[in-house]
Amino acid sequence: MRNTWTSSIFISLIFFISKIQAEPIYLDYQASTPVDPRVFETMVPYFTKEFGNPHSTTHIYGIRAHKAVEQARAEIAKIINAQPEEIIFTSGATEANNLAILGACRALKHLGKNEIISVSTEHKSVLEPLQALKREGFKIIILPVQKNGLLRLEDLVNALSSKTILVSVMAANNEIGVLQPIKEISKLAQQYGALFHTDAAQAYGKIPIDVVEDGIDLLSISGHKIYGPKGVGALYIKKGVTVLPLSYGGGQERNLRPGTLPTPLCVGLGEASRIAYEKMQLESQKLITLRNKLLALLQENLPDIILNGDLKARLPGNINISIKGVDGRLLLSRLTGIAASVGSACTSANIDVSYVIQALDPEEALPPANLRISLGRYTTEHDVDQAASEIIKVVKSLREKYPKGGRRSCLTNIQHLNK
């Protein structure tokens, strides 16, 4: 009885302490964003009152759901200057990338074209479908990037040929935030009659994109990157472009993606797109100001940090730095006051190198710690000051305590594993 009573008191105490402790400052907006309250409010009725199937348009419940989905489709199209009928709902950007790449290339294989060009820093939801196509007989050409993370256009020119079926280059990188020159890339692809696809999951709603002006044939987006719900995204397919489905069983979404659409999620993505379209310029200016302040504080107080990727051609809220003289595992364990993405070149069992960071300079020895900070809609100047203070304090402390970078340096681990 006494043990039970003691356990109850202990559990209650832990719960109370957890409540009064401050949450870490969220600086991982490129990983995911919170649902904007305005978006959530718009979604709620479609879970309960407006529960109709959007494909059952023989009665009022289905008609209202259908209208809501089509309104959302129009909002998504508006932000990229597309037509609503060119928007296909998916479960997210990963599915959209797979549908775009696999579907378009398989649809056009009969033309005798079999070469696909992409970039070494693409998201794995692009690189892995390309590997699947390689096993089907397609030739995959992966181009390197420069030290600033940008594709060298001359490399693309040299790789293009009459056999090129698709060029896929992301608009904004998910790790280092660099913005590729997609308009110039699409023009080059068009000269060889190739389709151009861009993974715009990180760019959509944050920077201007015009599928007409930019010459985009296929474009992928995701809801949870723009303060919408998880589990929904979309693929823009230019009118006239042929794509084969990846699954079968219904005629929904132009026979490309069968299954009942999740009305609340579609509505949420539409509302998130509407808000992003209205607030894009103001939010961009705010994030650039906060980003530049945070980067300046870090550079002024911490020698031997490297900014990964081009500073100008960059998402407004992204900072990605490599930190010399610090073990990534130790950095992760000490940064308790902020929530950011910490990548380490070393782990206890193996070498875990970010292929994106490595691609910037394959010959360069990587610093043992890499930190991605991504600011967002709810980041404040106070957050930036607090984050800078903690990062500076922790890095200095680790450098003093472990002057060689940690208990075992990266080099030691690499030598051990290579024996």
Image (cartoon, rainbow, N blue to C red):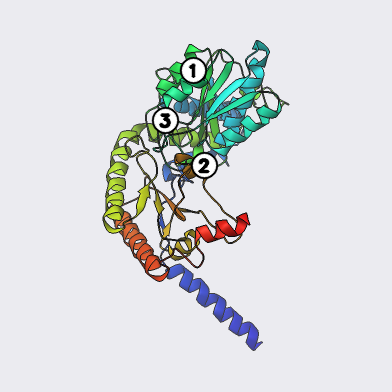
Q: How many C-alpha atoms fall within 10 Å of the one at disc 2: few (<14), some, or many (≥20)?
A: many
Identify residue for label 2.
229
**Residue flagged by tag 2: what amino acid is it?**
Pro
Residue most toward the bottom? Answer: 2
User: From the viewer's perspective, is the residue at label 1 or at label 2 nearer?
Assistant: 1
The disc placed on residue 189 is 1
**Where residue 272 sits: x, y (%)?**
44, 36
The residue under the point 39% across, 18% down is: 213
- Residue density around tag 1, few if under 14, some if 14–19, many if 20 or more, within 10 Å: many
Q: Is residue 142 left or right of residue 282?
A: right
Please give left or right for residue 43 compared with residue 210 in the image: right
Q: Earlier in the sequence, mark 1 or mark 2?
A: 1
Going by the numbered disc 3, the residue's amino acid type is Gln
> Regarding mark 1 in the picture, which secondary structure is present there?
helix
- Compared with 307, 65 (above or below) is above
Label 1 and label 2: CA atoms lie apart by 34 Å
Badge 2 or badge 3: first in the primary sequence: 3
